[in-house]
């Protein structure tokens, strides 16, 4: 009884003391997306953070800006501590570190200190260094707080005290084993070795138990990875044991035990309820795999330069998502474009997008100073010269040159040409109207398919149809969209291919239809059975077949900017050739098409359709009709050429002009060493030291004699082939400065097709039935789905080890 009264009195006194001075311990309640803690007026006060769930992917990496681990809730401190240990010290490699101190003798941080003192961390925001181990095991009071505050909270900036026998770094480490740094280092090492955990000494788990625990976990990892690879939904509506459909995850997991009795027993006899199949475990494993994929991408970059490809789109839940793709040259000399993540942004302002990009880069130890290219669409928030995203990044990294997506430019050129020519604009309006009439209902779509079957069977019976695998497939009329690349060609080609079945469907609607439907079908039939419509139909197909080759080439990841500009030039040449030489062929093809389908052809002699027709019978109505068609032909092609010249005017860029010297396509022209030197001096001065610029001139002379005159060099078709050839022939080692120039040129972006593909993948992962997916879950699932090639290289054992070290587990692994 006395003991109970004493305990009650203690609790009352504790509650009374906490209620009297609430201001001494302020509480800041943050949500999961809060990146930093606001700075309090009194820095000696302890800040307590209340979080239901910590998003480890948003942990601040900058040592001067991050939150102290002891400020997190005590039950989450170990999770945060392990997360930082997995990330390692923040050691950004900068070309030049800022100098400070007296004007007579300014000093700066030296990158060599990272190797001498691996525990060092550098803060770009405060130009100071910190101790990583001391931060991980820092305490709110005692020697760790007062004695070592310079290396845990404030930062050390007195560079003149580094070096010599009184080196501040050596003094921080201390000579005794009881120094705060050595104690923190010991705790750091112990936490990395789970076998030394005291629980493993007292708890009796055999090696066979550990093997079973790992096997059970590997089954879960395999299932998580499979669901992510196939874009499956993980959970089911009813996951209870008596449910007939527990969802994809549990069903696939049980399927693994259907043919293996040991696995079946393991899945149903987990010790301490550690089955590791809960939704939270699924997300944690998915996060571990996605982190490994990002780590592999960073290893591919290997501290080199890279390009940013960014675009934004709304997902199924109407959230604005920003896709980040990194373009770089790997160690084999291949151009790589890797999907690096999806970031939910509150708005699409340039500053918000920049903050999201920098957060992702910093979290993965990628320096924004290494950006050497920016590829976006033509939106104002992206390409703005003063407040656009490219302008903001260019201020921080002046050598991150912006390139407007070539595929977007081509689409804009096609749309401008189709809208600028009156005859083409009328044609596409008519085409859209016809497709709407024929495809308005499922009944009419079925009628179109039946008409195609009859049409194919008839021509096959008379032997006028080529047969083979993949040929003569049944389809529907394709709709054209202004924002879908290549959709106009597909729409035009589908109507030409299904012209006769389309006419049959329209005639059937005229015969059986009623009301306005019958009138729309009659108008559509009259429109498409005129010589004028068929002429423009084939003209548009000829033009867009030429531009579609360019469109497909621009979307290849391995495309380089010099080859892209060369393809644009060849496209212009083919359009000009179509205008000058192929009028008679086009007209003959249109007339043949009309004759096969019994469509009336204007009663004109062949002389009227020759290019000299304007010299005779100029007052004839037939001649005027012919002149009108000739004008459409020339105007459509001229307008397309003008738009291509307007959209693709990069030939005036000095950077691209100077880069053409290294293009193997110009092997027959004199090699201009001075152009390469000017390219480096003007556009990439920070990537070459002064002595390297001098050495580059000598390398270029040897390069001209050894490489440019080589027989294999003259067989190369692009600068990307040159990059791979230099690696394969080991000439990249001898001409490493020239190889660096080639890599920088190839880093420049061509199109944002990879970001568009990531949005297509997003629509498969986040569907209407999965529209409540968390942003982090969506990001991790999308990385595995999109970068499956890398994810498959990660062994299950590796993920088991990552899972074991992430936090304390109920059973030993």
Image (spheres, rainbow, N blue to C red):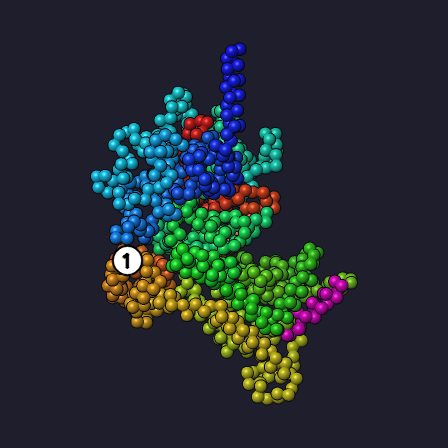
Question: Principal SS element in the magenta part?
Answer: helix
Q: Please name the residue shown 43% across and 67% down the image.
A: 650
Q: In this rendering, is residue 786 above or below 407?
A: above
Count of number-bearing discs: 1
The residue most toward the right is 515
Res 683 quadrant in image: bottom left
Label 1: which residue?
A: 689
Q: Please name the residue shown 35% across and 67% down the image.
A: 658
Q: Position of residue 257 (x, y in %)?
A: 51, 31
Q: In this rendering, is residue 431 above or below 389?
A: below
Q: Position of residue 386 (x, y in %)?
A: 47, 61
Q: In this rendering, is residue 611 above or below 721?
A: below
Seen from the viewer's position, the closer of residues 292 and 793 is 292
The residue most toward the left is 165
Seen from the viewer's position, the closer of residues 411 and 676 is 676
Relative to residue 88, is residue 700 drawn left or right?
left
The residue most toward the top is 1
Q: Is residue 775 visible?
A: yes
* Residue 305 shown in magenta: no
Q: Please name the residue shown 47% across and 30% down the image.
A: 75
Q: Is residue 781 visible?
A: no
Q: In the structure shown, which secondary structural element does the residue marked by tag 1 occupy?
A: loop
The part of the chain drawn in magenta is 516-532
Q: Please name the residue shown 32% across and 53% down the image.
A: 95
Q: Position of residue 165 (x, y in %)?
A: 21, 39
Seen from the viewer's position, the closer of residues 116 and 272 is 116
């Amino acid at each position: 009884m006395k003991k109970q009264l004493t305990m009650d009195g203690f609790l009352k006194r504790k509650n009374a003391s906490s209620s009297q001075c609430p201001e001494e311990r302020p509480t800041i309640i943050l949500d999961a997306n809060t990146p930093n803690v606001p700075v309090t007026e009194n820095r000696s006060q302890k800040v307590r953070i209340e979080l239901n769930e910590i998003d480890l992917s948003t942990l601040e990496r900058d040592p001067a800006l991050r939150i102290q681990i002891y400020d997190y809730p005590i039950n989450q401190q170990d999770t945060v501590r392990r997360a930082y240990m997995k990330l390692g010290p923040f050691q950004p490699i900068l070309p030049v570190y800022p100098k400070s101190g007296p004007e007579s003798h300014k000093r700066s941080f030296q990158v060599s200190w990272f190797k001498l003192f691996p525990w060092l961390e550098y803060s770009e925001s405060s130009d100071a260094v910190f101790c990583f181990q001391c931060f991980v095991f820092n305490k709110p009071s005692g020697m760790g707080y007062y004695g070592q505050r310079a290396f845990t909270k404030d930062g050390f900036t007195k560079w003149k005290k580094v070096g010599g026998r009184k080196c501040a770094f050596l003094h921080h480490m201390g000579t005794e084993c009881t120094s705060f740094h050595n104690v923190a280092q010991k705790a750091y090492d112990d936490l990395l070795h789970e076998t030394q955990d005291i629980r493993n000494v007292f708890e009796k788990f055999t090696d066979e138990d550990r093997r079973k625990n790992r096997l059970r976990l590997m089954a879960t990892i395999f299932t998580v990875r499979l669901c992510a690879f196939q874009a499956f939904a993980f959970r089911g509506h009813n996951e209870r044991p008596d449910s007939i459909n527990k969802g994809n995850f549990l069903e696939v997991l049980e399927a693994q035990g259907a043919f293996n009795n040991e696995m079946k027993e393991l899945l149903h006899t987990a010790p301490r309820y550690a089955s590791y199949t809960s939704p939270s475990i699924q997300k944690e494993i998915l996060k571990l795999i996605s982190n490994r994929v990002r780590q592999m991408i960073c290893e591919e970059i290997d501290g080199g330069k890279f390009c940013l490809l960014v675009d934004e789109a709304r997902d199924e839940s109407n959230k604005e998502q920003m896709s980040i793709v990194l373009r770089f040259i790997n160690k084999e000399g291949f151009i790589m474009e890797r999907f690096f993540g999806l970031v939910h942004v509150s708005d699409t302002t340039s500053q918000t997008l920049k903050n999201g990009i920098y957060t992702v880069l910093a979290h993965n130890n990628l320096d924004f100073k290494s950006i050497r290219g920016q590829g976006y669409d033509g939106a104002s928030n992206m390409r703005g010269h003063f407040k656009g995203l490219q302008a903001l990044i260019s201020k921080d990294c002046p050598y991150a040159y912006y390139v407007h997506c070539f595929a977007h430019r081509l689409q804009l050129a096609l749309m401008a040409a189709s809208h600028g020519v009156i005859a083409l604009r009328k044609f596409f309006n008519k085409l859209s109207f016809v497709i709407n009439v024929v495809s308005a209902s499922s009944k009419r779509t079925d009628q179109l398919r039946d008409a195609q079957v009859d049409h194919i069977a008839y021509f096959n019976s008379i032997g006028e149809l080529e047969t083979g695998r993949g040929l003569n497939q049944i389809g529907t009329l394709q709709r054209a969209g202004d924002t879908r690349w290549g959709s106009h060609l597909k729409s035009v080609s589908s109507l030409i291919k299904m012209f006769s079945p389309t006419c049959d469907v329209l005639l059937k609607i005229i015969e059986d239809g009623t009301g306005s439907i019958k009138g729309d079908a009659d108008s559509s039939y009259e429109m498409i059975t005129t010589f004028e419509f068929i002429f423009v139909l084939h003209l548009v197909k000829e033009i867009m077949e030429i531009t579609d080759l360019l469109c497909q080439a621009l979307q290849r990841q391995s495309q380089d900017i010099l080859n892209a500009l060369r393809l644009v030039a060849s496209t212009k040449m083919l359009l000009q050739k179509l205008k000058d030489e192929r009028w008679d062929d086009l007209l003959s093809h249109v007339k043949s098409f009309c004759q096969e389908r019994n469509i009336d052809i204007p009663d004109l002699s062949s002389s009227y359709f020759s290019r000299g027709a304007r010299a005779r019978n100029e007052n004839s109505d037939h001649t005027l009709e012919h002149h009108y068609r000739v004008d459409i032909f020339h105007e459509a092609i001229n307008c397309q050429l003008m738009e291509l010249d307007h959209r693709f005017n990069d030939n005036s860029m000095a950077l691209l002009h100077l880069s053409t010297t290294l293009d193997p396509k110009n092997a027959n022209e004199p090699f201009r060493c001075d152009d390469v030197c000017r390219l480096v001096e003007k556009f990439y001065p920070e990537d070459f030291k002064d002595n390297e610029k001098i050495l580059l001139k000598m390398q270029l002379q040897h390069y001209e004699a050894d490489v440019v005159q080589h027989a294999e060099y003259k067989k190369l078709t692009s600068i990307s082939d040159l990059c791979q050839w230099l690696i394969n022939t080991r000439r990249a080692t001898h001409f490493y400065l020239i190889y660096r120039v080639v890599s920088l040129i190839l880093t420049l972006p061509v199109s944002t097709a990879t970001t568009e593909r990531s949005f297509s993948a997003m629509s498969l992962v986040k569907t209407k039935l999965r529209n409540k997916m968390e942003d982090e879950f969506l990001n991790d699932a999308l990385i595995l789905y999109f970068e499956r090639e890398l994810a498959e290289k990660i062994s299950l054992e590796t993920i088991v080890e990552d899972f074991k070290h992430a936090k304390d587990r109920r059973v030993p692994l």
